[in-house]
Amino acid sequence: MIKKVIVITGASSGIGKALTKRFAEPGTALVVGARSIDKLDELVRELSGNFKDILPVMTDVSKEEDCKNLIQKAVDKYGRIDVLINNAGISMRALFENLDLNVIRKLMDVNFWGTVYCSKYALPHLLASKGSLVGVSSIAGYKGLPGRTGYSASKFAIHGFLETVRIENLKKGLHVLIACPGFTASNIRTTALGSDGSQQGESPRDEAEMMSAEEVANRIYKAIGKRKNSLVLTSQGKMTVLINKFFPKYLDKMVYNHMAKEPNSPFK
């Protein structure tokens, strides 16, 4: 018997893929979206030995109709939605003064508008189930990161959007979680966009020192179960949020110096 229906965007890799595997348990049905249907089909095959209730839907979250279709497919097949996890996202790495503005537009289309579109069409169903609306954001939604203007802007926008939706529905039983991983070992940096919009191709950071996508997924899974409002991950991330509350100017210098140490940093 299906007890919960979970919709996850950006499910073909990284945190999204790890979330899909974490939620693949008895009594749960999964509807997973990503641009690559081949990667989604591969994920379905990986889970097929022990888990059958999964529906892959090719979805480009920057397109409103794709988001509407994803939600409709979930409702058509399972009749309800209990959790929507807005995970799909892209990053960037370039100084604003050198940046083609289309890069910021693309990041806003995917990260912010993708969250808005999916949330809009899922909201009536989440209100009916008194379910959970989740945004996978970033510490960059609390503190602007140099070289990531578009990324930080999109995450700040997600925070404002989801906080407002939470407050609007305080008396309707809707749970809204803003989950903020720190630097995570995933493919988001290898697919990050450069100043001209091309993919940078390799991560500038040491992935071995980062929290794994599986650990991030497990923490988000638990936070949803506890219906938490926010989740800030890694000791560095928690310290960043705390220091920014009391000493934002000092943190500006700390963040600048930290990010300038990246290999091939766009600023020094």
Image: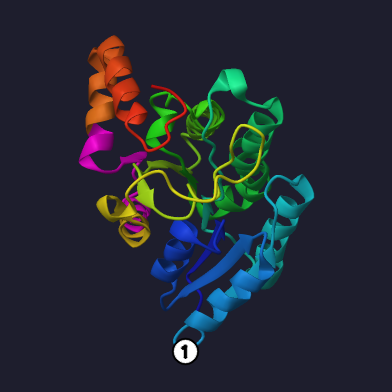
- Seen in the picture, residue 75 relative to 99 is either above or below; the reply is below
Q: Residue at x 75, y 58 (%)?
A: 69
Q: Residue at x 67, y 63 (%)?
A: 75
- Crowdedness near tag 1: few (<14), some (14–19) or many (≥20) residues, C-alpha within 10 Å: few
Q: Residue at x 39, y 27 (%)?
A: 142
- Give the residue type that dot 1 points to: Gly
Q: Is residue 233 magenta?
A: yes
SS of the residue under disc 1? loop
Q: Which residue is mark 1?
A: 49
- Seen in the picture, residue 246 relative to 190 is either above or below; the reply is above
Q: Residue furthest front?
A: 264
Q: Is residue 158 magenta?
A: no
Residue 51 location, x and y as percent? 48, 82
Which residue is at the front of the view, 51 or 59? 59
* Residue 45 left/right relative to 185: right
* Residue 86 left/right relative to 122: left
Q: Which residues are magenta?
A: 220-238
Residue 104 location, x and y as percent? 64, 30
Which residue is at the front of the view, 74 or 65? 65
